[in-house]
Amino acid sequence: MALCGGVGASALPSELIVHIFSFLPDRDKLRASAVCSRWRECLFYPALWSGLKLRARTGTGSGSGTGTAGNGTGRLEFLIRRFGSFARELQLELDGAAQSGPGDPELGERWREAAHAYLDQVLCLLGHLRNNRNLQRLSLYGDTCILQDDGILDSSCLAQIDQGGKKIKEMQQLFEEILSNSRQLKWLSSSFMLGLVTPCSLASLSNPSAETLEHLSLLDGQLPSLVSTAELQRLVHLRSLSIDFCDFSSEMCRLLSASDRAPLHRLSLLLNGAALEAKPLDGTATEDDLKALVRRSANLRVYLMALDVCSQDLLRVLKPSLPLERIHLDSFSTLVTDGVLELISQQYHKTLTHFVLVRDDGGFPDLSVNRNEDPLVLLAWRCVHLAVLIIHGYTVWSHNLVAISRLRGSNLKVLTVSEESIDFDPDQSVFIEGDPVHNLVKEVSLGLGRVWHPSMDSSVILSDPTQHFHREMLSFSEGV
């Protein structure tokens, strides 16, 4: 059957062609638009682009970027220019190729190019969204490579790429304009968008959107807090919140516990150990505050990611009343102790479903030293709803891995352990014939009821933790 001309596509009404194209992913829609003018006209029907999921690269190198809807800045600008004014949902992720800050003599130029591209892309996006009154969902994830690993960019760094801060100020004004023009915003998320959100941004949110907003996530790892208790007071129908752990104060927790508000269902908290000197834990929600919140929000579930937080601070953070469902402990220089794992398995055995333990260091400490039972095995035994277990950077003995697989069985949907984290007990290997790795794969596969292999590529586990938090937070909050 001819697809273009003749008896085929030309005989179909445009409405039917649009309906057929609605089943295509965004990338294929763009490709199909090059077939002929008729298809192009149908493919750019507004109803096909009510939701945009975009991904662009801000750095150099490959330079093209990847995305659901296209590659590179050119396609990003094309789609935003064409559909930004009426799209109901927009999700943007900016990935950077620059891996260091401007202080690195080799990568300083790449950093500046990445920062320039970031500013231009964000200005393009916001400029075409400013008059969109149909926007219901806005989700933005910035470039953590631009933010640097070692802290906040100072004014001298910003002056290298943005003379007088003109572009940063324009970005902030456009973002506030979008919030003030919105009329039915339900989802607002901005994570690590350099210079975009200020403590005053949320005050620009229109009253109609303040009534409809159900999810709020404002994170950038900088000072001061981007979400104030006063502004949260307007968001009476908020059901999902994602903020810096140190900004989750007693006052905010008490506000969310009020009876005249919708109960909170999802709470995502990011705790960065490097920021604890400037943002201490002293003012965070107390045990009594959390008890009141849980009484008001019986279905509340919490996701916590701790980045390079020492065990002493973790013991202060892990309060009994916190209904933790997902925990991600990611560290570079700090070490999670067996006492922390013991506390987690005892306090959250009824709620914990996801547990990620990652350490990006050369050593592989053994948490089972001087213990009768391995704390990871106890975690798998006590946490009856555990469905995801990911481990890298800590020694996992092969016999304990087999025990974990047998304890949780097919209910453990994800068991990811890096190959370099697995060790074999020489005393037990004497009694086992054949290759120990082959026997381990066989035993764990039997325990899980499916084929299993250790993770050969540790980069899969050691991904950008802030990007992991952003994506996990999206899937966690969408469950409301």
Image (cartoon, rainbow, N blue to C red):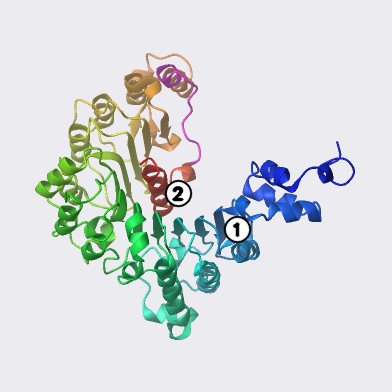
Q: Residue at x 27, y 25 (%)?
A: 384
In the rendered structure, which disc, 1 or 2, sits on the residue that comes first in sequence? 1
Part of the protein shown in magenta: 444-457
Is residue 394 visible in this depiction of the protein? no
From the viewer's perspective, is residue 243 above or below residue 171?
A: above
Residue 54 appears at what percent x and percent y? 56, 56
Q: Nearer the viewer, residue 397 or 329?
A: 329
Q: What element does badge 1 sit on?
A: loop
Query: Identity of the amino acid at label 2?
Result: Ser
Question: Is most of the magenta stretch helix, strand or loop?
Answer: loop
- The residue labelled by disc 1 is 65
Give yes or no for residue 84 being in the magenta stretch: no
**Residue type marked 1:** Gly
Q: Nearer the viewer, residue 207 or 70?
A: 207
Say whether residue 86 is visible: yes
Residue position marked by numbered label 2 in the rendering:
463
* Residue that sits furthest to the bottom in the current view: 164
| Label 2: which secondary element | loop
Contact flag, marks 1 and 2 (Cβ < 8 Å)? no
Could you say which disc has been placed on residue 459 in the image?
A: none
